[in-house]
Each structure stands twice: as C-alpha cells, then as structure tokens.
Image (cartoon, rainbow, N blue to C red):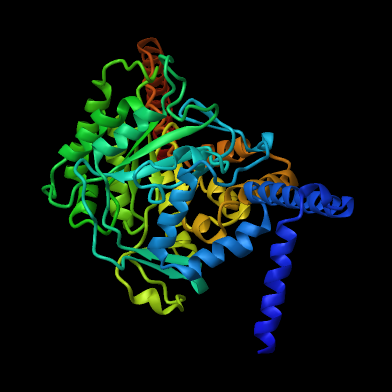
Amino acid sequence: MFALRRGSRLAANILSHSHRPLSTSSPRSNLRTGIYAAGFVLSTGLFAVYYFDARSALHRYILTPTLRYALDAESGHKFAVKVLKTGLGPRDPCSDDSRLESEFLGQKVSNPIGLAAGFDKDGEAIDGLFNLGFSWVEIGSITPKPQPGNPRPRVFHLPEDSGLINRYGFPSQGHASVLARLRARIPPFQQAHDTAALRPDSILAVNLGKNKESPADSIDDFVFGVRTFGPFSDVLVVNVSSPNTPGLRGLQNRELLERLLSGVTKARDELPVSIHRSKRPKLVLKLSPDLDEAQLLDIADVIKKSSIDGVIVSNTTIERPKTLTNPNKVEAGGLSGAPVKPYSLKALRALRSQLPSSIPLIGCGGIFTGADALEYAKAGASLVQVYTGFGYDGVGACRRIKDELAEELKKEGVTWSEVVSKAVDELSLKPVAPIVVAPLAKASKTENELSNLIAEAQELQELLDNLDRRIETDSSS
C-alpha cells in the first residue's frame, strides 16, 4: 500500500509539473540542462575521435577481443568486413615514415605492409581497408561462378598459438558481383587513373580462384579472371596454393604450371587498352609453403622462362607443428599465423636463391610485428602481407607494425629499400658468366709462341745428346 500511495503522489507531482508554463522554469534548471547537453556532445565527440583512430587501445584490447569471443570465427570475420564496408570504420591518422617507402615492379608504395587475400573475399571493403594504412589490399579469392565453399564450421581460432585454421574452400559471390563493385568505385567523369587503388602510392590486387567443379587440370578459370579483372586491378594474383580446393595445388607441378603461366600471361598481354587503367596489370603467382626443394627448383625454372612478374610466398600450410597446443589443431584445413612463419621463410629463401633479382618476392606468413617484417626483408622479400595478425590485433595492426618497423630501421640506420636491395643482390641467383673466346689474332700469337718453345726444346735436346756422346768418348779413352 505504501508503494502504491507513493506512486500515486509521484504521478500527481509529475502531472502538476507538466501543466506549469515553460516560462516558470528556473534559470538554474536551464543552466543545468545546457551543461548536460554540452557534456553529452563533448563526450560523444571525444568517443568518436577515439573510435575513429585505429591506434586506440579501445580496438585492440576491448572491441576486437569482445568480437572474437562473442561470435564464432566466421561470424566475427563477416561482421568486421561489414563495418569497414560502411565507411564508418576506424582510420590510420598518421603519415608513413619516409624510411618505409618502397617500390614494387616500378610502382611506388608508401610502406611495405599489405593485406593478404582471404579477408575481403568479395571486394566489399576495399576503401575501408586502405583507410587502415595498408599500401597493398588484395581481395579474393574470386571464382568465375558463385559458390558457397565448404560447409560450416570452417574457421577455427588457435589463440594460444597465435594461429588460425581455415577450410573456407573459396566461398565467392562470383566474377559478376565483384566486378560490379569495382566499377562502382570508379569516380564518374574520370577517364584513366595511375592505379586501380584510386589513391597514390597504393596497389589494388585481385586474387583469382578456381571453381570447385572445374576440371583439375584446366586453366580456363584463371584466364577468364585475367580478362575480367585486368582493367580494374594493379596486380592479378594466380592462386594455385590453397589446400582447401581439391586438385588446385596440382597446378604447381611443372607441366601444368608451364601451361598455366603461358595462358595467363598471354591473356594479360592481349588485354585491350582500358579507359579505367593506363597500364596492364602485373601478374603474381602465389605458392604453398609445403613445397620441397626439388619442387621449388622446378617452379623457379618455370618462372624464369615465363613472363610472370613476381611471386607471393606463401599461402597456408597443411603441416601441424608439434608446438601447437590449442585443441583446434586437429581441424582440417590450412594453418596460418605465427606457426607458419618458419615454413614460409624457408620456402622464400630457397626460391630467392633460384630466381634473378629482377623477379620480386612478397613474404606472407606469421607477421605480427615490425621485427617479423624486417626478417622477411632480410630474406629477400620486397613487400610483406599480413592476415592472421590483423585478425588478432585488430584495425590498428598495420599502424603498429609500421611504427615498429620504422623504429627497427632507425636503430640500424637504414631504410626498407636499402635492406631489400642488399638482401636481393646478395641472395638472388647470379647470372652465369659467359665463356670468353680468345680473338683469332691472339690465337695466332699463341701458336707462334708455342712453335718457338718447341724449337727451343729441340735445340736443348740436341745439346743434351752431344753432351752424352762426349761423356761416353771420355770414358772409353
């Protein structure tokens, strides 16, 4: 009863206050309302500034871990892509250190940190990802026809191991859908651009995949991809290294690889002049870290004889190191993150020693810090790509890696380009020195000298014979 009586009096008071004219509001009440409103606006503005700064601890220590533990791995991945797609995602607010400037196949980039394929599979968040500070954004893999990929669940975190296992199997909306998005990015009334990224010192790459039902030895899907996306990309990546599409890795075998590289380079060279791009795209091959030395030697020989422009080393591994501790280690699929780094570096060093310096390599696998990136540069990589490290560390991962890398370079008193140039010069395959044939004039001179030596030897022999005869005569007498 007490609660009811109190509630009735409270309601009556509210009604009586509601009928008072507005003019009776006290100055103190208006001041208080103004202070509250100003405080709300100010706090909202401060939060927005904090949120939109990719470096803020909010993303690394609160939002990203919450997303990882609140949702399953694939749902969290898709949510992140949708946020970046809206244009309301965080941004890298800083300019890149001049020590990080690099060049890839004649195109300048502001830093060597790129995002590998697999995060933005359908080209939905290209500009949102560039806004995070990546110099290279690679979308895909994209298959000609739409396909759902493998059944869920198909992505598994290994947080204790800083790793990830996925068996996505190229889920893709298909060429037509992604092509429409790439066309929609192009500003109207502009005929041509220096880069498909539509921003300076950046590269947009499209990773080409193969439909699951396509014949294992067919190269048609890749050729079709070159013709479709060539006018809208700076780089086309030929992905023959995913372990999650049956038969795909077989295209790394010598005979099939020769036919594949011949087909895609021919298709690229035949691309008509585009109103969207002033240059034809570069072609890059993406390899597996599970190739043995003999296979790498064969692949290097094929690459040298082809017109391929560069190589990415590497994709995910089917190996399971004994150091893995998370129970998800038993899941089938490709392992990425810190555990794949030794495999990728080993393959990169082996391939660097078998390719000339004119063919650049891109390192990918287990890059979480600036020191990791620098290790790849010293092994001969011109650029690096991140994937799992980005997923674990969140939207500020690229800026942190760049800052750490700049600090490492400052300590050593060098730039990224200097480190790469030195490593590539020292570790790349050296050209075979040509056999110099002596000119005919020199040959004639050599023959004359030889004849003189023979004559002198004959004279010496005659002197020795005469000396022997004299000794015999003296002995008999």
As drawn, the residue found furthest toward the top would be: 441
**Which picture quadrant has residue 289?**
bottom left
Task: Residue lying at the far left in this picture: please name it.
Answer: 215
| Viewer-side residue, 432 vs 202 | 202
Percent x, y of residue 445: 41, 13
Image quarter of the N terminus: bottom right
Residue 157 lies in quadrant: bottom left
Taking the view exactly as shown, the residue that stands out farthest to the right is 28
What is the x, y in percent for residue 434? 38, 27
Q: Is residue 304 above or below residue 89?
A: above
Is residue 14 at all visible to an observer of this figure?
Answer: yes
- The quadrant holding residue 183 is top left
Q: Nearer the viewer, residue 7 or 134?
A: 7
Residue at the spot 24% in from the left edge and 48% down from the top edge: 252
Quadrant of the image containing the C terminus: top left
Vertical side of 443 occupied by 79: above or below? below
For residue 233, say whether it is visible. no
Query: Residue 352 or 251: which is nearer the viewer?
Result: 251
Residue shown at the point (58%, 41%) measured from the top left: 133
Q: Is residue 286 left or right of residue 132?
A: left
User: Which residue is found at the position 35% from the left and 47% from the top?
Assistant: 121
Residue 51 % position (x, y): 64, 51
Residue lying furthest bottom: 1
Count of numbered tags: 0
> Where is residue 120 shown, x and y percent of the image?
40, 47
